[in-house]
Image (cartoon, grey):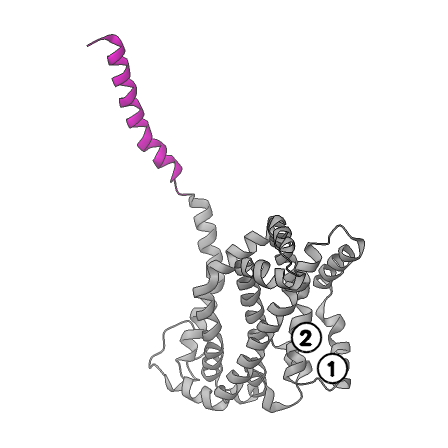
Amino acid sequence: MTSATVAKTAAKTTQSQEKPEKIRRDHKVNWWLTAAVAVLSLTVLVPLYFAVVTALKTPSEAGTFSLPATWEWHNFADAWNKVNYPKAALNSAIITVCAVVLTLLTNTFVAYAVARNMDKRFFRFLYYFFLAMMFVPFTVIMLPIAKEMGSLHLDNQLGLIILYTILGIGTNLFIAIGFIRSIPISLEEAARIDGASTWRIFWTIIFPLMGPINATIAILTALWAWNDFLLPLITLTDQSNQTIPLAQYVFQSQFTSNYPMAFASYLMAMAPVLIVYIFAQKWVVGGVMRGAVK
C-alpha cells in the first residue's frame, strides 16, 4: 500500500468521524431558548387550564386550580340555553363570513392598484394614509363611528360588516402589497399584449397567485370579527343581531354567582375559531412572511 493510498484512507476515516460530530453540533438544543418558550407558554396554558376546570365545577368549588370533585358537564348545556348559543353563533358566523368575503373582494384589489402604482404620488399617499389608520386608537373614533352608523341607519349587521372591511384595510395592505410587488410584472405585460384588461389580469393572474396572502387576510379577519366585542357593542342596536361576545355580556349578570356556567360559555365561543386556527396556522405564518419580504 502506497503512502498516497494510506493518506486518502486516513482522510476518509477522519471525515466520517467528523460528520456525526458536525451533525450533533448542528442539532444541538438551545436550552435557554427552550426554557424561555416553555415559561411564556404558561401565560396561555395556565389561564386555559383554569377556564376548563372551572367550567366543570360547581359554583362553590370555583376559584381554585384543583380538579373538580365531580365533573359538571351540564354547565355547558345550561350555558348553551342561557346565552341562546345557536342564534348568537349564527349571527357571528354571518358577520364573519360576509366580512371575510367582502374584504377579499375589495382590499386585495386596492392593494394591487397601490402596489403597481407606487411610483405615483397619489398612490404613495394612499398607501401611507391607510397605514396611518393602524396607529389611530380605536377609542378616538369609537363615538364618531357609533354616531355616523346610527345616522346612516347602518346600526345593524350590514354596517358592522362594512366597518370590518374598512377598518382592516391598513393591515391588509401592509401584508399584501409586499407580496404583489414580488410577482413579476412580465406576466401582466404578456397578458396585456394578448388584449387582457386590468380587471381580467387581476382576477385571472394576480388573485390566484395571492393564495397564501388571501388565506392570511381571511384568517386574521375571521379571528377579529368572531372575537370582537367593542365594535358590535357600539354598532348593533337590535338584540336579535347580537354576536356571541355581546350575548355573553348581556347575560353576564346571570353568571355573577355561577362562574362555571360563564366559563363554559366562553369555551364554547372559543372552540370554533380555535379549531380553524389549529388547521390553518401554517398559512397565517407563511403568508405573513411572504408579505413582509418583497
Query: Is residue 13 within the magenta segment?
Result: yes
Secondary structure under tag 1 reads helix
Q: Amino acid at mark 1?
A: Met
First to last magenta residue range: 1-29
CA separation in Å, label 1 and label 2: 9 Å
Q: Is residue 213 left or right of residue 127?
A: left
Q: Is residue 150 above or below residue 112?
A: below
Between residue 271 and residue 182, name the one nearer to us: 182
Q: Position of residue 189 (x, y in %)?
A: 64, 51
x, y percentage for residue 34? 43, 49
Reading the image, the residue beneath label 1 is: 149
**Do the residues bearing badges 1 and 2 touch, measured as CB atoms within 8 Å?**
yes
Q: Residue 45: in sight, yes or no?
A: no
Which residue position is annotated with label 2?
A: 163
Residue shown at the point (74%, 82%) measured from the top left: 149
Q: Judge whether residue 214 can be spotted in this image.
A: yes
Q: Amino acid at mark 2?
A: Leu
The residue that appears at 44% across and 55% down in the rendered structure is 38
**Secondary structure mostly taken by the magenta-highlighted segment of the chain:** helix
Residue at 58%, 77% (x, y): give it: 98
Q: Residues within 10 Å of mark 1 (few under 14, many from 20)?
A: some
**210 on left or right of 267:** right
